[in-house]
Image: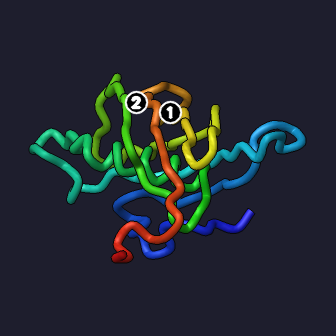
């Protein structure tokens, strides 16, 4: 499925999409899903030990949630997240997102970030589809 959102995002900072599409075998209810990978770089590190700043992991998870909703005017309204394990320079992590509920223009997206199958981050993202771009006036 073509990605319709966040067309100019920096993939080195927020992850590279590897999957987007419908959840479930038949794509029932139009519920979306995505997978996005990111390699932690030295520029993301906060110290000499190579600890990656959590903002990059959150950005990866947010990017995956936006692709799961996959609308040009999707925005993040809220997030309830847990950072469970650290990420180090050189780690390759993957965010998997799945729309679990849609009500009108509001979608609830479950996101997990893993490294080699181990969950490092989990969150519920509340996304909204706006009628026009959030920066359009009027």
Would residue 60 be found to the left or right of residue 33 on screen?
A: left
Mark 2 residue crowding within 10 angstroms, few (<14) / some (14–19) / many (20+): many
Instruction: Relative to 85, say whether 33 is above or below.
Output: below
Q: Residue at x 49, y 50 (%)?
A: 128
Q: Residue at x 31, y 37 (%)?
A: 87
Instruction: Relative to 68, say whether 117 is above or below.
Output: above
Answer with mark 1 or mark 2, whichever residue precedes in sequence. Answer: 1
For the residue labelled by badge 1, is the local secondary structure a helix, a strand or a loop? strand
- In the picture of the structure, the residue carrying the numbered disc 2 is 121
Q: Residue at x 57, y 59 (%)?
A: 17
Instruction: Relative to 104, say whether 44 is above or below.
Output: below
Where, quadrant-wise, is the N terminus in this rendering?
Answer: bottom right
Where, quadrant-wise, is the C terminus in this rendering?
Answer: bottom left
Rendered image quadrant of residue 18: bottom right
Residue 81: % across, % down: 36, 29
Please give the label number shown on residue 112. Answer: 1
């Amino acid at each position: 499925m073509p990605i319709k959102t966040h067309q100019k995002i920096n993939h080195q900072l927020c992850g590279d999409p590897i999957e987007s599409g419908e959840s479930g075998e038949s794509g029932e209810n139009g519920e979306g899903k995505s997978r996005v990978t990111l390699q932690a770089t030295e520029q993301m590190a906060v110290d000499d030990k190579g600890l990656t700043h959590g903002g990059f992991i959150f950005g990866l998870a947010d990017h995956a949630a936006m692709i799961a909703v996959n609308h040009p005017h999707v925005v993040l309204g809220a997030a309830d997240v847990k950072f469970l394990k650290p990420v180090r320079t050189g780690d390759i992590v993957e965010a998997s997102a799945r729309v679990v509920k849609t009500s009108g223009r509001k979608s609830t997206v479950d996101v997990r970030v893993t490294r080699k199958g181990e969950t490092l981050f989990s969150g519920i993202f509340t996304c909204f589809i706006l009628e026009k771009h959030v920066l359009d006036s009027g």
